[in-house]
Image (tube, grey):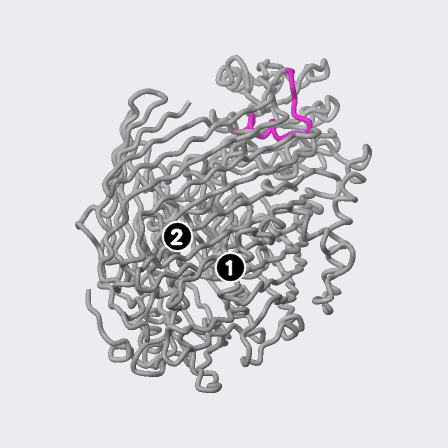
Amino acid sequence: MTPFAPPLMAPAKRGLPAHLPGLPLAHAHVLPFAPLLALLPGLPPALPHALPQRLLLALLLALPLALPLALLPGLATLAHAQTVDYGALEATFGEPVTTSVTGKPQRATDAPANIEIITRDDIRRSGATTIPDVLRFVTGLDVRDYGLGSADVGIRGYNQAANPHLMVLVDGRQVYMVDYGRIIWAAIPVQLDEIRQIEVIKGPNSALYGFNAVGGVINIITYDPLKDKLDTATARAGTQSYLGGSAVGTGQIGNTAALRLSAGGFNARDFPAGPLSPADRASRQPPYDGNINADSRWQITPFVEAFGDVSAGENRLSDQEPPGVFGTERLSTYAVRFGVAADTALGSLGLSVTANSARVEIGEVNAALPVTVGEAQSSTVIQASDLVKLGLHHTLRFGLEFRKDADDSGFLTGGTISDQIAAVSLMWDWEITPSVTLTDAVRVDALQLHHAGILLPGTGLTNAQYDDTTLTEPSFNSGLVWKASDDDTFRVTLARGVQLPTLLQYGLSLRSTALVPPTVFLGSPDLNPAIVWNAELDYDRSLPPLDSVLRNAVFVQQTDDVVAWPFGTPLAAVQRGTPIFDSRNVGNTDAAGAEVELKGQNAAGFRWQASYALVATSDHTVLDAGPVPTSIVEYAHSTPNNVVIGGIGYSRDRLELDLLARWQSSYLDFRVNPQRTGLVAVNIDNYVTMTARVGYRLTDTLTLALTAQQFAQDQLVETAGPPVQRQIIASLTVRL
Amino acid sequence: MQTRAHAAIAPRPSQLACRDLGVVMARIAVMACIACVAGAAPSAAAATLSPQELLIVGHAVGFMQPPPTAGTVAVVYATGDAASRQDADAIAAEIGTGLQAGSAVLAPKVVDAAALAKGGFAVAIAASGANGPALGAAVRAARILCVTADLAAVGDGFCTMGITAKPRVTIVLNHAAAEAADISFVAAFRMMIREM
């Protein structure tokens, strides 16, 4: 018998765990102060080693108390804008502005990291209906589609299902799922029409964002309701019975308060099941997605701004959970955040509290094996920062963060697995000369695990083991930017990123009776985080005669202590005839690569892009030693080594024409075999996918567009799962 | 699409690493050659403000704290310098009815440096040839922001802020001159400009 046996194979019909309907945990975390209040009387007895958290908590509490003091007349300097005014700064400097790399506002070309900014115009012209559709044509990124609206995104060689290497944020709010550390893109409560820009940072950035920002960071920046009045609506209809749309409206009370409301969604018939096993085939259901979001800002005084946003979403999408199993997942998400920012003599102070919660139902609708697994996930994050320019050439950013993540599933984890993380960070940006800038950032994260519930007996795991688990990890980012001339920029970066094992890798406690003999899959509290070392050299060259910019990058990366899910690791033990497999650190992996990109546009209305990305990865792990593959942790073969992206567009008067194409070399992908006893490795042949869009402005407020996605073939095999069909979508946009 | 047993096609990791690394290095070398494509030499900064630079002046003034809510833009020429006066007139004509600075619209007025003492000006724009000790003293006395396209004049302290748009937007602030005139900017803007 091979160790792979997905948890969905349990033979008995299972409803949601008894504790799910009430969702006490999720509800607790919708109240953002709940975890904070829970800490106030004293740390729970389960956290004996949490002294750093006490210290951090005291600092977090001290900061808002200090804020009013800082605002006292005589101490505070007058300012009129607190959050970064992206629109005004972009208009001033003639290029997109970002805070994603260091926390400091800076021009994209000055940032000490490889960052690509996708503008609102890029998004519109791409014809995309989802964010992964936009990212598909970004150099160095790989997108895996599982169905309409469902995809995973990888950066530079870590192209895998439920990718835990990415950090994705909306206006700085983290949106990843804590179970697998994955991103459910459709559940991100943002409409494409309200996005100002998408910032893609390639490479680790743990020193600013902490755990999991090891492959890269994608920060989705929306319009500021206080500064940008956006009223728009889009309706879409197309093949696959696709019906969708979105609406965004902004209300402003002078310059003092504003609210932007947005809502959107779609439903459709999904792509055909293709080669999926009968069980996976039966589990596919028509996808739908709906999200609503409210984003508010208040200018409390000329130098203090408050903000708050709340969102909710419901969707049902094809997905891979666990990786290799193509099923359907239903997700309900809620998020709330509020905060305050102020310009003071002490610097730009910021404080925010965010609470995310998600209820996940993984359904395998199959008459023979009806299974529904439920999870309640939550995360609460409190962040405080101070960004200050000292003298003429130094900028410092101090950051404090406390977060609590929890995954509550009687079926998967035997209760609730949770962590609490306290972190302190410092960024120092030094303008050594007008043309040379050095940026260093360090961050130390301290983690405390906790498990409550009943772990599987006979496995040796106890709640106390989890409660005794702590770890402290430093991370750093360093970047030297040399503007050799007005046209030439060199950038050298070095980073140590930290990838925390996901909550399921820590806390899985699953006995699958679908297998003969019954098999146990465990997490492990003894896991080490994966450490990612990265070095990169970039060279950007403006080419005024060509109205273009040439960007070049070479990088090397090593990941130590790769963490693998228990589905596919070597046998850990056999107890009373029951095989036990556990999550473990399985070795290391190396990657090296290079990217070249030429991008430009001219006054005649033409625009173009061409890029080539190369990445080669080698694995040195204990996995997949046998004749049949058992683990998807197979980076060396599961990423296309070569990717070429090209695009051309033209605008004239009211017309926009765009064509984007991507060719990628072959790679290996995996799906569970029909017997559920192992994986089938599927060679995905090299392929070309093309998207075209024609947009025409009927009036100043009305735009009609026709988009053909993946139009070169009827259907295309992009993964080991369902093929991706040609999709034609017509849209009508009203923008007031 | 082909389906096959994974072990049959997978090279040993060490073989793969060596082979791929060689390929990577070779391709990186090719890319490095491509990267050597030469572009045009940067152009020198103009001494007068272009229309694009005037727009940037408006944006920059909008980042002052507090931003001006009313007033006039003084377009300053050098007394007795016909070319300078001509440039000032051209700048004023380009501004037209007003310079958009944040939420304010500032009407232009062509003056010489001595006229700044009369007050009523929110910002001074130095026409070509106007930068000099007289202008520096006048804007300090009037406690107003002075903007020029001559970055060297900023270094000399004759004018507070220098702005050029080509080949890329550059904004330079003489910190001492700004402090002397009690002029400050929002933090985000300060972090994005070069201060001297």
Q: Quadrant of residue A367?
A: bottom left
Residue occupying image coordinates x 28% and y 55%: A644
Provide the residue span drawn in magenta: B56-71
Which label number is shown at residue A17?
Answer: 1
Left or right: A232, with A685 as reference point: right
Same chain assignment for discs 2 and 1: yes
Image spot of residue A50 (x, y percent): 72, 65
Q: What's the amino acid at mark 1?
A: Pro
**Magenta stretch contains residue B57:** yes
Image spot of residue B160 (x, y percent): 65, 31
Q: Which residue is mark 2?
A: A551
**Nearer to us in this view, A83 or A338:** A338
**Nearer to us in this view, A23 or A244:** A23
Q: Secondary structure at mark 1?
A: loop
Label 2 crowding class (10 Å Cα cut-off): few <14, some 14-19, many 20+? many
Q: What's the amino acid at mark 2?
A: Arg
Residue occupying image coordinates x 63% and y 66%: A450
Report if residue A657 is visible in the image. Answer: no
Left or right: A177, with A418 as reference point: left
Report if residue B134 is visible in the image. Answer: yes
B65 vs A117: above or below? above
**Magenta stretch contains residue A357:** no
